[in-house]
Amino acid sequence: MPLIEYRDALNQAFDEEMTRDENVVLMGEEVAEYNGAYKVTKGLWKKWGSKRVVDTPISEAGFIGMGVGASMLGIRPVMELMFWSFAAVAWDQIINNAAQVRYMSGGLINCPIVIRGPANGGTNVGATHSHNHESFLANIPGLKVVCPATAYDAKGLMKTAIRDNDPVMFMENTLLYGEKWEVPEEEYLIPLGKADIKREGTDITLIAHGRAALTACTAADILAAEHNISAEVIDLRSIRPLDEDAILESVSKTHRAIYIEEAKPFCGVGAQISSMIMEKIFDELDAPVLRITSIDAPAIYSPELEKRQLPRPLDVVEKVLSIC
Amino acid sequence: MATAVTTTDFSKAPINAKLSTEQKLKLLTEMVRIRRFETESLRQYNGGKIGGFLHLYNGQESVAVGCVSLMGDDDHVITAYRDHGHALAVGMTMNECMAELYGKATGCSKGKGGSMHFFAPDKNYWGGHGIVAGQTPLGLGLGYALKYKGLKGAAMCFMGDGAVNQGCFYESLNIASLFEVPVVYIIENNGYSMGTSLARSSAFKSCLAERAEGFGMAWGKCNGTDIYEVRANVQEALARAHIESKPTLLEVSTYRYYGHSVADANHTGGYRQKDEIEFYKQNHDPIQHYKRRLIEEGVLTEEQYEQIDEAAKSEAAAAAQFADESPVAGEETITQDVYFEVDRQTEAGRTGKHFFND
Ligand SMILES: Cc1ncc(C[n+]2csc(CCOP(=O)(O)OP(=O)(O)O)c2C)c(N)n1
Ligand SMILES: [Mg+2]
């Protein structure tokens, strides 16, 4: 299987879906002639031209809203936010329009849009550029939220997201764009709402999404090698819809769980998962469900300190040892 | 997007005619200091000492220096992420700015803000803002507060040519005109927003500033090559704010020599060509232009210029050394400076849980 970069896996997904469906349009700041700020859309403008790959002015509320409106009439816009942090400028279009139009029209209108881009800290770009909006957006009924951790997942989930008839918030990671994974040459799709067991284990379940799933895998390797602890790693991949069964099944087997995420703790995805485990399989638990998140403060710029702000594999190991 | 050839002699404008030799040399020195600071920070960035983004101001120095040179006690400044020039112009030290780029405790924001987020409220400098056009309503707010307090001041709000397409900017223009807020919006039109030329990003009649017309607001356009021209135009807008409490939208043509940020490798041979950059360096460089002018005026000699340049170079090198030798703040500082009440341990700060790390 070829090893390809996360960004190229996404690029392939766009290209394949644009070939399959003439209504798929890529849009955003610098996505066309500049090949994307992070080169995710590289070569696509050259191949598909200005009708299918569109550079927009810096007007997030305007062009995201335009995508929402166009999707109501059957276009399938794949909208790039150069950073998910800039979604704040377009919040009304996403939260009041994309998420609510189906409900308020009694199901008459749907909104098959994908809004995508990187949503992560860890690159020393400071508080305004390092937001993780996943729990925020998953809080809104009507939106779907996807956070792939690998190139394989990114491609399969993107193709599904583009075909999905609801608004999908697709969150990537600038630290992963250049990482490589095996991606099959033949076509595949990954359903939204299906978690992936990234490591099998018996002693504890580490649940995570996005890059934190990779942190959990590294921690699981250390736990196996140095502490004789067998950790199962569940990567949610999609946060809403959520694969509850995968979590409940795993925790029923291991009886211990920790949620790891790079977002902030308050009302985070981990808080939702922890409450769900407690409500549904309380008797299976041998320890409280714990959470590891970024340190609860705005993203610090200082390269030295930001390293410390995000969860590291050793933070996971330490937390695991506190309950195993 | 070639800038218009200057025809008027702006040295005769009253605001420039009254400049002393010392003041003229200061204008030049400030521009040179900014350029040397930026060049040094680029070197340190390439040496791995600085993280994140670095948006350099080289080529645009006349705008920040010209505008700031007109500030009185109650005039204020706010800008976007290309903010080092404005910071130095208002009097922030190279040391605190460089240390901020290094993420050190001695930085102007203790290493918390980084390149895009410099602040010095004690010098009427309100940042340093990373979200394109996010500062434009804030500039309006500064002007509003000045008027509310009955002060004869103005807020100068800087922005790029790409920022003019954000909705909050138009909301601000309307409110500024409607409420008669003493704010001066200054578009630093360097021809590009990242890799997108002005023509590919903005629809307009004659220029961007003309968009103010629809709000019944005064507007103007000038060339940034000549710092005297910048000063003459901005002075008019400041007077309008001070005397009539009315806003202005000004557009200044300028040019950036480096990429959008240091990571923008595309900027020569990609969206623009090397000879275009050379053309601007040769014909529109604000420092060279002003240097020639001062030599003509008999206020400056080549030797003096060399001294100014050398001094700025060593100041920047010393700042890099200062930053390098400065400590990184402790981990415990990550959760400081989030809430005023918690930092001060007031009653409010001691009531209820504010942080959720445990
Ligand atoms: C809301 C928002 N969208 C996009 C960006 C990314 N971005 C940063 S600067 C920039 C270009 C802005 O160009 P311009 O306003 O002309 O300012 P210049 O960089 O030329 O000084 C873009 C797209 C951002 N920081 N904020
Ligand atoms: Mg610009």
Image (spheres, coloured by chain):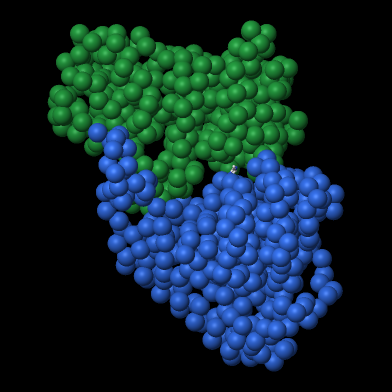
Chain colours: A green, B blue
> Which residue is depicted at the point 40% across and 43% down?
A298
Where residue B211 appears, x then y in whole percent? 79, 49
State left or right for residue B261 relative to residue A56.
left
B76 shown above or below A233: below
State left or right for residue A148 relative to residue A205.
right
> Which residue is depicted at the point 83% across and 75% down?
B8
Instruction: Work out whether residue A269 can be spotted.
Output: yes
In this rendering, the count of numbered labels is 0
Residue B29: which quarter of the image?
bottom right
Where residue B331 appears, x then y in whole percent? 27, 49
Residue A282: which quarter of the image?
top left
Q: Nearer the viewer, residue A211 or B349?
A: B349
> Which residue is depicted at the point 55% across and 54% down?
B81
Considering the image in quadrants, where does the C terminus of chain A appear? top left
Where residue A299 appears, x then y in whole percent? 40, 44
Instruction: Work out whether residue B39 can be spotted.
Output: no
Residue A187: which quarter of the image?
top right
> Which residue is depicted at the point 54% across and 86% down?
B307
Spot the residue most to the front: B150
A244 shown above or below B236: above
B183 shown above or below A130: below
Where residue A157 appears, x then y in whole percent? 51, 20
